[in-house]
Amino acid sequence: MSVENVPDPTLLGADSAIIAVERTAICGSDLHLYHGEIGGQGIHLGHEFVGTIVETGPDVRRVKKGDRVLVSAVVGCGHCDPCLARDPVLCTGGGPRVFGTTLEFHGGQAEFCAVPAADSCCLAIPDNVSLEQSVLLTDILPTGYTGAMNANIKPGSTVAVFGLGPVGVFALQTAMLYGPSRILAIDRVPERLARAAALGAEPIDASDGQAVARILDATKGRGVDSAIEAVGADATITDAILSVAAGGTISVIGVNMNMEFPYPMPLAFMKRLTLKAALVSVPATWDHLVPLIANGKLQPEEVFTHRLPLSQAADGYRIFDKREDGVLKVLLDPSE
Amino acid sequence: MSVENVPDPTLLGADSAIIAVERTAICGSDLHLYHGEIGGQGIHLGHEFVGTIVETGPDVRRVKKGDRVLVSAVVGCGHCDPCLARDPVLCTGGGPRVFGTTLEFHGGQAEFCAVPAADSCCLAIPDNVSLEQSVLLTDILPTGYTGAMNANIKPGSTVAVFGLGPVGVFALQTAMLYGPSRILAIDRVPERLARAAALGAEPIDASDGQAVARILDATKGRGVDSAIEAVGADATITDAILSVAAGGTISVIGVNMNMEFPYPMPLAFMKRLTLKAALVSVPATWDHLVPLIANGKLQPEEVFTHRLPLSQAADGYRIFDKREDGVLKVLLDPSE
Amino acid sequence: MSVENVPDPTLLGADSAIIAVERTAICGSDLHLYHGEIGGQGIHLGHEFVGTIVETGPDVRRVKKGDRVLVSAVVGCGHCDPCLARDPVLCTGGGPRVFGTTLEFHGGQAEFCAVPAADSCCLAIPDNVSLEQSVLLTDILPTGYTGAMNANIKPGSTVAVFGLGPVGVFALQTAMLYGPSRILAIDRVPERLARAAALGAEPIDASDGQAVARILDATKGRGVDSAIEAVGADATITDAILSVAAGGTISVIGVNMNMEFPYPMPLAFMKRLTLKAALVSVPATWDHLVPLIANGKLQPEEVFTHRLPLSQAADGYRIFDKREDGVLKVLLDPSE
Amino acid sequence: MSVENVPDPTLLGADSAIIAVERTAICGSDLHLYHGEIGGQGIHLGHEFVGTIVETGPDVRRVKKGDRVLVSAVVGCGHCDPCLARDPVLCTGGGPRVFGTTLEFHGGQAEFCAVPAADSCCLAIPDNVSLEQSVLLTDILPTGYTGAMNANIKPGSTVAVFGLGPVGVFALQTAMLYGPSRILAIDRVPERLARAAALGAEPIDASDGQAVARILDATKGRGVDSAIEAVGADATITDAILSVAAGGTISVIGVNMNMEFPYPMPLAFMKRLTLKAALVSVPATWDHLVPLIANGKLQPEEVFTHRLPLSQAADGYRIFDKREDGVLKVLLDPSE
């Protein structure tokens, strides 16, 4: 992991734009690349970034040079029906891509970043939404919200959120948009459990491996209606499955790379379970999340525990990876 | 309006029960009867009541003598599929009835009240739910919630609530269970507007008849996604219709008796509107509302501004009808 | 009503196109203009047309010169989020417009027609879809389908369709896509009733004004779950309302211009009714309807009873207006 | 497997009934018991049966002695809210049970069978529904329909059904209730493929293991919107998963006993998949299926290829197990 001088990016096509990055953040999924579990050497990282448009191709119409924009971490071709409907996961023109995850598709932990299909993935930052809030709208808040959206939460429901990193915290906060009567929050880290309790959830300490038993106990043996998994580990996904009541839904947003995840089919059958996993269609969430932030109903920026200049990105990664210093989320500023 | 000695009620059939009433409340719709607009002379009023079962018919199974229960204001036959599914509005065995609205079907503003189809309309009062909260679960909180449920509110939506009496306040509070970004609250009474503001809504003073203009102004001309009407007057229903954006929903819970309400069909057509009106299926809401109250997510009892012995019911009606003394909701206690 | 030589249209902007019309049809709503009930003198009629693109502005991207296209009768600005999501009824950039209904916005009963926001309202005619089928995809089949979509039909439901003109026939055929157990089809014209019976519906003759009584009789007094109104008259909308069971939905697609349609609010309240009226978002229906036609599941072209050269449009209007000669739908061909 | 004389059953409680069985059928899941894969020695088999009530406990109310009834294969406690709402899978009073699958809970391949919670699991056979149709309403048609219900099929959707035994055939027929444009039908047996083609589906021969490639080929590489798995084998469930497009749903109704079914999590994540598996809540489907049968929209009885006296049940099992003689479904008649 290093910060290097690279050539300035050039336009990727008539529908693309160049962004002068103003803020960018490190995401938990960057750590998979950091550790070389996926990707490879030489990738320009970063899929959470905001900045000012400094150049546009001739076909860009909805944003323009000089606009301060936030950029969806996930982009499609930009021109098929699902992309126009802001749902790149369903893109029929090549499928979804994530910035900064391959050698060819450079990310935004940089001074400048080239953005394809800019009309489909850029949003001019609205009034009453700060730069830091905007960074969180590029991926991680929409991801947490997707976890909540897919969990079939109804007024009065009981919910369990597994994993209280930034995605889990946002899953928890956006789960509250659906009016549950209880949210059980599961993690092993005391500060994370305390933070969840402060947000109105019931903390469940999983450090002794007894999370499922505690959840069943807290629900008189019934289990929860909805479980949101925000870790991506086999063990926590399994705990989520074992924690839901008959008729329940398990919504997985933690990235799990197991092509043979052991799913307990008889249990799913007898209890009529629904399992959803999802890469987020970031732009599809903006209509919902932007007015909530602009009207003060969500304050996502509280997750930033560390703010560093981009030149210290290597420190930021180390702190985040080692979970030093109570870190929850690291913001990088290229201008400093 | 008078409090009189009447014979004790007797069982209404093998599936019925007798309740010794412990708390009962006056509802806005009782005023229609009070003024003789509907009903007639001699009706035993009261459809919001809770108490202890003192006698049951042989077919009553889910509750028993000695149980403290709350009673749905709306009951069906109790034995058809919709009634068993707790949805008496769809009752196919005679349709829904409301306690205390006809000469034959006595209400619960009394020391004792006979309850038909007790299994379908009685709920043993759960732990962590108080008597006063229980009274509000018999009609008015479920009614407000039905208004919110029918309004198609989504995370980030904009909502307008017309009328901030008790039903409107509950519509407003339960609308928040759906995660809206804004709730505009419309009334003419300063205290009611102040109460709505304290609950997190944006007050809109309608006393000069310019509510629609103010709502459009507050939404940059677009209108709101959802309007909930909790008054029942032609004028406010019309305002609600004029306030919604294209694709919007108007949910009417204020009782309106106009068989020829003037609906603006061309507007509905061009803007693709949905109009819902609904008598509430009280028991269908308990699964949602009871855990919200039991877990402290809803505090409905704050609406009670006046508590009187049942013997002073006539005073209670007068205060409520004249809107004296900042009254919002009157509770009556037969035991005092 | 006359066919006249007019100047060829010119582009309406960088996002527009010129279509050489190959087929166009007369719609029931054209008769409102024909009779001068709406619109005025000098309107160039026609909102159902297909043809070949002969010129495009520089910003048109999804279709090109030489493409055979069908054109949505309803268009929005073409660039707001709802328009990009193919839902012009919710257009936030000016709202929906219908071709050939104002002096400024010329229609397609012509040799050439200018089309704004072509990317949003043109669809290249797919394989296995004929020109005649394509004409029906521009308005009337999507309109009938919108009536069915808005009617909340579930497998096993009972449905009533009021009015068996072309829109009603399509409402009936697309209602079948939702698996109802029965469709009652109401009209006064024997041939129309016979056609509905041939399509699998149960004909109800309304010529003596007793349609509601017959529907209640046919459903043992219960009424139908869903009513679709495809006439637009106050009387049939009222019949539709009176025909639905508790919990039912009334979906109005017949254009009704009554700003004070008399809606029976107490009935709506006691029976928990839903009333929907809707201008169709034509392009939003193509994803559903095109594959159904291309795979032979819908044969909409059977509605064309009359095919005339465009030069005989005046005859076509007269036949259609007078309901001469068993007419159901008139197709006009500019090439003859 | 043998037919033996056993003592007549006695009532199971005040809410139970005794049925004199008139028709009963062998189900694919009986073969798991037949082979001893589940259950054990001495089980009285049979969960698909209809007959006449000969005795009832005192609390039975909705059916009575002398009624001809069909009996849900799946029963719950009969008295909790989900059971009253006809959804025993969500039963909170002990959970769902299936007749004839344990030593304690005797099945209906017998002259008499005791039925608990009779009000919740018996339905008086309606007019226009035959005995043979009724047998199919006890389990297998509702199971196929549950597969279709859970598959998120919309008008115009593309569907794949894996496995064309009786459950698969019913999944296919009820999938049509949702208006798909195409149904691909996958099996290895030529007669089954031919039957599916006759029902309007596109047969895909899986006998060379290339079903997925053929499905992708038939959909231009996109895959289907919905896949219904009616076999229960790991391989076909995996094929179903690989056959769906981005955003798709896999609905499993074939019973699979693998507690570690290998689910490809990265695929689910990138394509935003939904996986549902479900034991059927039989009574919840009757409101939909009974009117469809009574009105001739479904003819499920065509699946019966073999009709035998109950005394020849052992032959019936052998024929069904060995797939002799083009067998699809075997009906047994205790009266012969």
Image: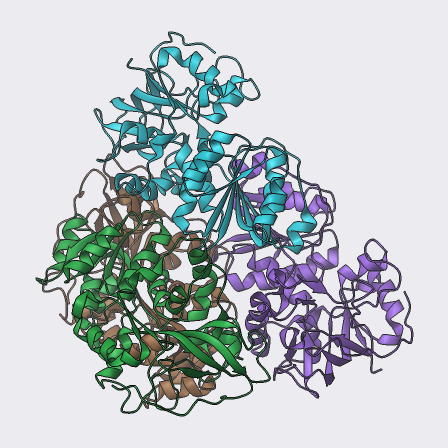
Chain colours: A brown, B purple, C cyan, D green
- Location of the C terminus of chain B by quadrant is bottom right
| Residue displayed at 68% across by 45% down | C264
Residue C107 appears anywhere in the view: yes
Q: Camera-side residue: B69 or D8?
A: D8
Residue A52 point in image, percent of width and height: 31, 47
Q: Residue furthest top?
A: C5
Residue D3 point in image, percent of width and height: 30, 86
Q: Is residue B257 left or right of residue D197?
A: right
Classify D11 as above or below C180: below
Total marks in image: 0
Q: Camera-side residue: D323 or B175?
A: D323
Classify D160 as above or below A152: above
Specify the quadrant of the image occupied by residue B86. bottom right
Classify A310 as above or below C330: below
Residue D98 point in image, percent of width and height: 38, 80
Q: Is residue D187 left or right of residue B119?
A: left
- Location of the N terminus of chain B by quadrant is bottom right
Q: Camera-side residue: A60 or B209?
A: B209
Residue A307 appears anywhere in the view: no
Specify the quadrant of the image occupied by residue D132. bottom left
Q: Is residue B17 left or right of residue D178?
A: right
| Residue displayed at 39% across by 35% down | C141
| Residue displayed at 37% across by 26% down | C304
Residue D303 point in image, percent of width and height: 29, 63
